[in-house]
Image (cartoon, rainbow, N blue to C red):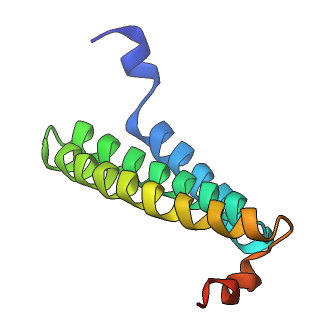
Amino acid sequence: MTLLAQIVTPNWYLVLAAVLFTIGAVGLLVRRNPLVMFMCVEVMLNAVNLTFVSFSRALNDLGGQAVVFFVMVVAAAEVVVGLAIVVAVLRRRPLATADDVATLKG
C-alpha cells in the first residue's frame, strides 16, 4: 500500500461528495436559470456517483461501480432530453426562468 493510499481514506471522498452534493442542492434552490439548475442536478448526480465508488472501493465490491455505470447512462439520456428542452425554451424567451415552464404548452 502506498503512502498516498494510507493518507487519502474513503472518508475524504465521502466528505468531498457531501460538499459537492451540498453545492448542487444550494445552487438548485437558489438559482432560477434553468441551465444553471440543470448543471446543479448534474453536480448532485456526480456526488452520488463518487459516494457509490468510494463505498465499493472500501468494501472491495464491484456492485457500486456497476450502479454508477447505470446512473451515468441515465444521466446521459437526461442530458440529451433535458438540455434540448432548456435550449428550446431559452431560444424562445432568452430571459426565461424556471417559473416560465408554461411556455411549453402548445
Residue 30 higher or lower than 9, as above or below:
below
Q: Which residue sits furthest right?
A: 95
Q: Which residue sits furthest top?
A: 2
Q: Is residue 91 left or right of residue 46?
A: right
Residue at 44% x, 55% y: name it: 80
Q: Specify the quadrant of the image occupied by residue 104.
A: bottom right
Q: Nearer the viewer, residue 10 or 27?
A: 27
Quick check: can you spot residue 26? Answer: no
Residue 6 percent coordinates (x, y): 38, 20
Question: Where the N terminus falls, by quadrant?
Answer: top left
Residue 42 percent coordinates (x, y): 53, 54
Residue at 17% x, 47% y: name it: 66
How many numbered discs, if any?
0
Q: Specify the quadrant of the image occupied by residue 62.
A: top left
Residue 92 percent coordinates (x, y): 75, 69
Q: Specify the quadrant of the image occupied by residue 105.
A: bottom right
Q: Is residue 53 left or right of residue 101?
A: left
Residue 24 percent coordinates (x, y): 64, 59
Residue 35 higher or lower than 52, as above or below:
below
Question: Where the C terminus falls, by quadrant?
Answer: bottom right
Residue at 40% x, 10% y: name it: 3
Residue at 57% x, 57% y: name it: 21
Quick check: can you spot residue 94? Answer: yes
